[in-house]
Amino acid sequence: MMRTFDAIAAPHALAPIVSALRAAGCVFAEDEAQLLVAEAPDSESLVEWVDSRISGMPLEYILGWADFCGERIAVDPGVFVPRRRTELLVHQAVSLLRDRPSSPPPVVVDLCCGSGAVGTAIARLYPEAELHSADIDHAAVNCARRNVDAVGGRVYQGDLFAALPPGLHGRVRILAVNAPYVPTEAIRTMPPEARLYESRAALDGGDDGLDFHHRVAADALEWLLPDGHLLIETSRQQAGRTAGIVAGAGFTVCTVHSDELEGTVVVGSPQ
């Protein structure tokens, strides 16, 4: 779109920005306009940012951060943008940690960490945790380090458990997993800002969306403490199958859903 919004450069000129964003299909046009105006370093950048958002670029890539669990998480272009529904995964992990305080500090692993949002949020809410995060994607690992380093955690690159130090075997109290779970064919129906801008590897969960859930559940027990927990984010529609996968791997399972967050988490405990 041509840059025809001269009024954007005027201080606090929200109306033309809101109108432009709304016309482009942004559902939360007013909130986004306020953020763009507040964060842009100058009027020229503001015009460029509005143009980028109108073209479909995720707001988080433009700002360089996402709001997650009430804190800013650095997000780089191409890295999976943390969703609000994933806050349920954090809340469940922290609740389990608080239910049974431990010494030495409990080990928390954020697998398929993306930007590191889940592990970082857990560590902020439960500072006693020893945090380890991992992802296979180089860009995600670089982004995660900016977030995880700030809370004293460590980040590794590799394929699932292969990324983790062997010394974590049998020591993990919380294994939090937000692995890709979108069925391959469903990716083409996702909103353009996810489908066109986020890494396909961060979305594609295989034919039924559950490839990573099978792989994680199969090896999780050897990494967990006897009183540890495996937590996997899934969709409400897939929850029954995810729970079956986790139960089949030797876990006692419960499923938690939040209507407010529109999030679903399967929690597995060693039998």
Image (cartoon, helix red, strand yellow):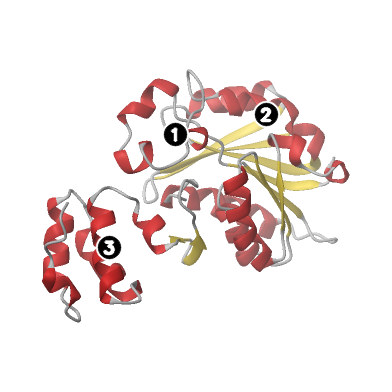
Amino acid found under the numbered disc labelled 2: Ala
Q: Residues within 10 Å of mark 3 (few under 14, many from 20)?
A: some
Camera-nearest residue between 31 and 137: 137
Q: Label 2's element? A: helix
Q: Residues within 10 Å of mark 1 (few under 14, many from 20)?
A: some
Residue 270: image x %, image y %?
Answer: 75, 34
Q: Quadrant of residue 52?
A: bottom left
Q: Is residue 246 left or right of residue 14?
A: right
- Percent x, y for residue 63? 39, 63
Asked which secondary structure carries label 1, the reply is loop
Disc 2 crowd rating (10 Å Cα; few below 14, some 14-19, many 20+) is many
Per the image, the residue denoted by label 2 is 217
When the figure is inspected, residue 262 is found, relative to residue 220, above or below; the finding is below
Q: Circle 1 is placed at which residue position?
A: 235
Q: Which corner quadrant of the image does residue 254 belong to?
A: top right
Of circles 3 and 2, the one toward us is 3
Q: Residue at x 77, y 42 (%)?
A: 164
Label 3 sits on a secondary structure element that is helix
Of 173 and 11, nearer the camera is 11
Circle nearer the N terminus (2, 1): 2
Lower position in the chain sequence, tag 1 or tag 3: 3
Mark 3–mark 2 Cα distance, whole angstroms, equals 45 Å
Residue 179 coordinates in the image, percent (x, y): 56, 36
Please indicate whether residue 94 sits to the left or right of residue 104 in the image.
left
Which residue was labeled with disc 3? Answer: 48
Figure quadrant of residue 37: bottom left
Marks 3 & 2, CB-CB < 8 Å contact:
no
Q: Which mark is residue 161?
A: none
